Image: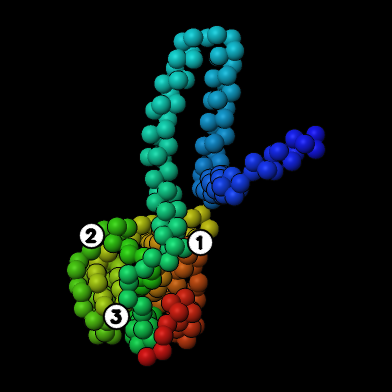
Amino acid sequence: MASISWEFLRLFSWRDLLDILSVSLLIYGALYFLRITRGLQILKGLMLLGGFWLLAELFQLRTLSWVFEKLWTVGLFSLVVIFQPEIRKTLSRLGQKAGVSVIKPVEERVVDRVVRVCSFLSDRQMGGLIVIERGQSVEGMVEGCVLVDSFVSIELLITIFNPLSPLHDGAVVIRGDRVLYASCILPLSKSAELPQKYGTRHRAALGISEESDALCVVVSEETGEISLAVGGKLHRNLDPEMLRALLLKELRVENV
């Protein structure tokens, strides 16, 4: 036994260790992906079907076995379609962790202008939805946008969110020091944890924060309440100072 163990250790190289670690990480990533998505329920269903397939093979039920073989072929493509949102989100997060970013950092003066605009809207109970990009572009996640591509200014943002403006219903997207788009339709969150009193604006703010690393400030038209969505979490009942502190922290803003 000792000689076998020594022979095994002698033949075991750093490449074998790297291979084992890589497979372990891959399995861990797959299990984590299943845990944070609806995949566990689907996996249970697949295991049940697999059990029926084994029984069909065991009892030599040829027609049923043939049906299951065809189902697995179609099922692989079906799973890609079913998990498309989750796969996109997971790959996006991997890109964020890799530190790949070509987006200009947000400066403190931009944060101050956003906070002043939100305070203005809140005092007058005017609705607002402001997406602030960080390391990841949201262009592939939003729809119906109107190109603005102008420097961030208080006057511009207030004008956009004026109820008489044709652009006021959608979201504004800020990249660096520029208002890139207005009137954007954001993906809606399906979270059951969001209280029913919050409407489409809050669900949209939460949705874009789930799909990307962007921040989204939302001002309620009904109550004037200011909230900030970050990473799928909604920080509610913020005053201007609290909003400013959170934005500076999350954006890691450089003082200018």
Q: At label 1, which amino acid type do we have? A: Pro
User: Which one is closest to the eye, mark 1 or mark 2?
Assistant: 2
Q: Is residue 179 visible to us here?
A: yes
Q: Residue at point 44% right, 62% down? A: 98
Q: Which residue is mark 3?
A: 177
Identify the element where label 3 is drawn. Answer: loop
Distance, label 1 to label 3, CA atoms, is 33 Å
- Secondary structure beneath dot 2 equals loop
Image spot of residue 183 (x, y percent): 25, 67
Amino acid type for the residue under numbered disc 2: Gly
Which quarter of the picture shows residue 101?
bottom left
Residue located beneath label 2 in the image: 144
Q: Residue at x 55, y 14 (%)?
A: 56
Residue 145 falls left or right of residue 190: left
Which quadrant is the N terminus positioned in? Answer: top right
Compared with 166, 86 (above or below) is above
Quick one: label 2, few (<14), some, or many (20+) residues within 10 Å? few
Mark whose residue sits in front, 3 or 2: 3
Q: Nearer the viewer, mark 1 or mark 3?
A: 3
Amino acid carrying mark 3 in the image: Asp
Question: With 154 as the anchor, is 40 left or right in this view?
Answer: right
Residue shown at 46% from the left, 10% from the top: 63
Percent of width and height locating residue 20 = 59, 45
Q: Quadrant of residue 55?
A: top right
- The residue beneath circle 1 is 195
